[in-house]
Image: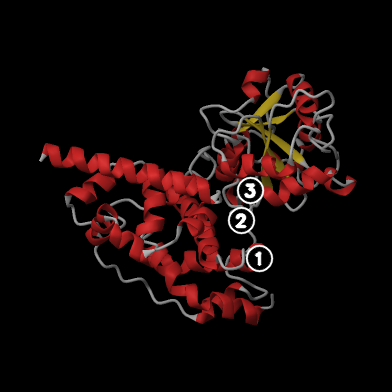
């Protein structure tokens, strides 16, 4: 690659304009520590400790607000702490009354969840949308579905106030898996319903469900279900 | 992959990661962030594409740097919805010399600075840049082409003004 840059006068000039910097010497112990049973940093979590508030007394309300599929989902209190009302001191989360149109659900500003999601997942740096879509394509098993949260991403991130009545099974006969993966993985212009889905291990996965008007498609199922919902904003 | 194989595979990239980081964060943060990068790499080792280990590490590093900057800005909760390019180095990060080309680079968007930096300063190939950015080689190539065009345009403007 350096040869290629050398042949490109502009890039070579840019390269030469940078001062030499001395990078700190890292040794193998760092690798050993990172791959040990007790790494320095540990698993990263979307929900930061400083946001954890006491939701005793509010749990029942929150369960009604947030339960996607499982009323005894242990993630309830963790999810609730995202709400700014809670972090401002309220013990209860205020149920939002936001509704969406189909246009709201589709990508905006040329950005797809391949972009939005990757940024919004923040700490989950190594999420792999392709891997996830593969699972989506094959359909969730019940055990996975029982612990899934859905966040709808528009200009902010919202969670539905009631369960989404949709199962994640094949998206439609006119969709091709590899094209679909290309779309969410590569394109910043992919259009569709943008979702963040949180699995039982607390990872958030980005997903775009492209418009597909084939009867019975996941898009239509999701769209119809989502349009009937009211939402609470969780990330601004 | 066991620990021994992991160490053997990534040992040669330790300094590359250090250099990547020192172009983007203060030197006193390099070791901590490098630890974080390799911990993630260890947890996700099975997802590492063979032959693209360094690019894959840079992909992780990009997110780690972006997260670090977000935290530094105290914006853990206020997650911006698009900051894939938050790992892009600025002209100051790269200690550019203030020449016309340096100013032209400084005038680029974060996205352009990111993709050009991966090529020019981090030494990745187009295929590796694609891995680092989580995109296809074709998209990476297009991004590079457009970034280079904008760099040239900025430079022309810079020269005409001087």
| Residue A33 visible in image | yes
Residue depicted at x 80% and y 28%: A217
**On the rendered structure, is A140 left or right of B119?**
right
Determine contact: label 3, label 2, CB under 8 Å. no
**Quarter of the figure that contains the C terminus of chain B:** top left
**Real-space Cα separation, disc 1 to disc 3, in angstroms:** 19 Å
Q: Identify the mark nearer the N-term, 3 or 2.
A: 3
Residue depicted at x 32% and y 42%: B149
Q: Are marks 3 and 2 on the same chain?
A: yes
Residue that carries the numbered disc 3 in the rendered image: A47
Residue depicted at x 18% and y 52%: B98
> In this rendering, which labeled residue sits more in front, label 3 or label 2?
2
**On the rendered structure, is B3 left or right of B37?**
right
Residue that carries the numbered disc 1 in the rendered image: B43
Determine contact: label 2, label 1, CB under 8 Å. yes
Residue that carries the numbered disc 2 in the rendered image: A126
Check the image and report above or below for A73 versus A6: above
């Amino acid at each position: 690659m350096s040869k290629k840059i050398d042949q490109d006068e502009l890039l070579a000039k840019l390269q030469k304009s940078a001062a030499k910097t001395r990078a700190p010497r890292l040794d193998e112990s760092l690798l050993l520590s990172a791959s040990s049973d007790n790494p320095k940093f540990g698993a990263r979590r979307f929900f930061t400790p400083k946001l954890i508030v006491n939701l005793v007394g509010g749990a029942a309300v929150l369960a009604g607000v947030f339960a996607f599929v499982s009323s005894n989902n242990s993630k309830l209190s963790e999810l609730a702490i995202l709400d700014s009302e809670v972090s401002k001191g309220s013990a209860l989360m205020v149920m939002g009354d936001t509704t969406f149109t189909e246009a709201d659900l589709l990508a905006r500003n040329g950005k797809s969840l391949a972009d939005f999601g990757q940024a919004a997942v923040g700490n989950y740096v190594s999420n792999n949308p392709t891997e996830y879509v593969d699972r989506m394509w094959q359909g969730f098993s019940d055990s996975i579905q029982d612990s899934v949260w859905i966040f709808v991403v528009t200009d902010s991130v919202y969670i539905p106030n009631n369960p989404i009545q949709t199962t994640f099974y094949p998206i439609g006969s006119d969709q091709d898996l590899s094209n679909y993966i290309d779309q969410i993985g590569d394109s910043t212009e992919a259009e569709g319903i943008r979702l963040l889905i949180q699995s039982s291990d607390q990872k958030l996965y980005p997903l775009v469900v492209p418009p597909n008007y084939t009867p019975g498609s996941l898009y239509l199922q999701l769209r119809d279900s989502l349009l009937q919902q009211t939402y609470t904003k969780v990330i601004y | 992959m066991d620990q021994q194989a992991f160490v053997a595979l990534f040992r040669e990239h330790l300094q590359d990661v250090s250099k990547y980081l020192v172009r983007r964060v203060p030197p006193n943060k390099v070791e901590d962030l490098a630890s974080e990068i390799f911990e993630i790499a260890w947890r996700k080792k099975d997802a590492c594409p063979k032959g693209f280990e360094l690019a894959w590490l840079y992909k992780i590093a990009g997110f780690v740097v972006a997260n670090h900057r977000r935290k530094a800005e105290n914006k853990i909760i206020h997650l911006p919805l698009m900051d894939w390019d938050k790992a892009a180095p600025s002209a100051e990060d790269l200690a550019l010399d203030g020449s016309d080309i340096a100013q032209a680079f400084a005038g680029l968007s974060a996205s352009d600075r990111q993709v050009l930096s991966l090529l020019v300063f981090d030494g990745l190939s187009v295929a590796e840049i694609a891995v680092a950015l989580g995109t296809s080689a074709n998209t990476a190539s297009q991004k590079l082409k457009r970034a280079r065009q904008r760099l040239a345009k900025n430079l022309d403007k810079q020269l005409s003004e001087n």
